[in-house]
Image (tube, rainbow, N blue to C red):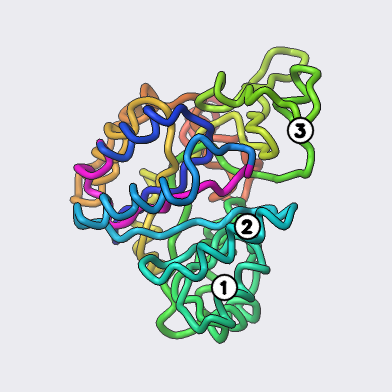
Amino acid sequence: MNLSLGPLLYYWSRDDVIAFYDEAKRWPVARVYMGESVCSRRHLLRLPDWLELAEQLAAAGKEVVLSSQTLIESESDLKTLRRIVSDSRFRVEANEWGAVRLLSEAGVAFVAGPTLNVYNPETLDVLAALGAQRWLPPVEMSHATLAALLERAPTGMETEVFAYGKLPLAYSARCFTARHYNLPKDDCQFRCLDHPDGLPLSTREGAPFLTLNGIQTQSAGVYSLVGELPALRGLGVASLRLSPQSRHLGRVVEAFAAALAGEVPAPATLTRFMPGPPVDGYWHGRAGLEHAGLMHISEKHV
């Protein structure tokens, strides 16, 4: 089992992005997913810039995968997708079915991203026939559901699981960050730059609820499966995805690498580095905002 660094889901300054990936060269991650997968208006780095960074990371010994945009809304978006697919240097993560079609027609192997929403082995069979060699389950999939699906998975298909970060829950043609500031989507003034880990959304009672990230809605809590490595190994999971955050991700990578090496993580090992409360409810078949560790403690006092 190895570690993957997922695509950057937030809008950071050009200097911050370059510094982040320069640091990532030294992290014990086997592969790095790169590119703008959320919003095409985020263009402080354009495709040639991403490709230059990809070359640098590949030279540092990382497997580089280009992540496609999740919502294709214009001819410009489609043009960028075609350029990504036609670049033969790096594998592509398909995050919508149009990308799957283009990759299949090109006859190249690809990664089936979590937003393809694969919930059954029949869909996985279709993707394998089209050229997928690695796939990611939807982030809300439980251990039990994944176990049942993998019993009938295509031979040779690698499984990568989202194991750390705020959960990407939904995408919309609307920009919720712009709406928060009473701005139209086409004149959003790039307010996402003000929120390097997304814009927190609370309930009326003040409890953490969701995170707004432009057109993407995320969990308020930070998903972590660092304590579930034996179960993940038992399923034959090949890779764990860690999603970028603005601070301390290097410490998070270290903690996961240590856990993979056999160290038992202390409950507070990661929580002090999280930009939100810990959650893992989906993995246990419960509400996504629950945390099994805290839940077990409370059950002992009932």
Mark 1 residue element: helix
Q: Main secondary structure of the magenta part?
A: loop
Above or below residue 35? Residue 84 is below
Residue on which the image places disc 1: 149
**Image-based side of 34 in relation to 277, left or right:** left
Residue on which the image places disc 3: 186
Mark 3 residue element: helix
Measure the alpha-carbon separation of dots 1 and 3: 41 Å
Q: Where is residue 184 in the image (x, y as percent from the top left)?
A: 80, 27
Q: Where is residue 148 in the image (x, y as percent from the top left)?
A: 56, 72
- Amino acid type indicated by mark 1: Leu
Magenta-tinted stretch: 23-40
Measure the alpha-carbon separation of dots 2 and 3: 24 Å
Disc 2 or 3, which lies upstream in sequence? 2
Residue at the image point whose x is 47% and y is 65% from the top? 92
User: For this rendering, which residue is in front, 14 or 94?
Assistant: 14
Disc 1 or 2, which lies upstream in sequence? 2
Residue 33 falls inside the magenta stretch: yes
The mark total stands at 3
Residue at the image point whose x is 32% and y is 53% from the top? 3
Q: Can residue 190 be seen?
A: yes
Mark 1 surroundings within 10 Å by alpha-carbon count, few (fewer than 14), some (14 through 19), many (20 or more):
some
Residue 274 falls inside the magenta stretch: no
Q: Which of marks 1 and 2 is in front?
A: 2
- Amino acid type indicated by mark 2: Thr
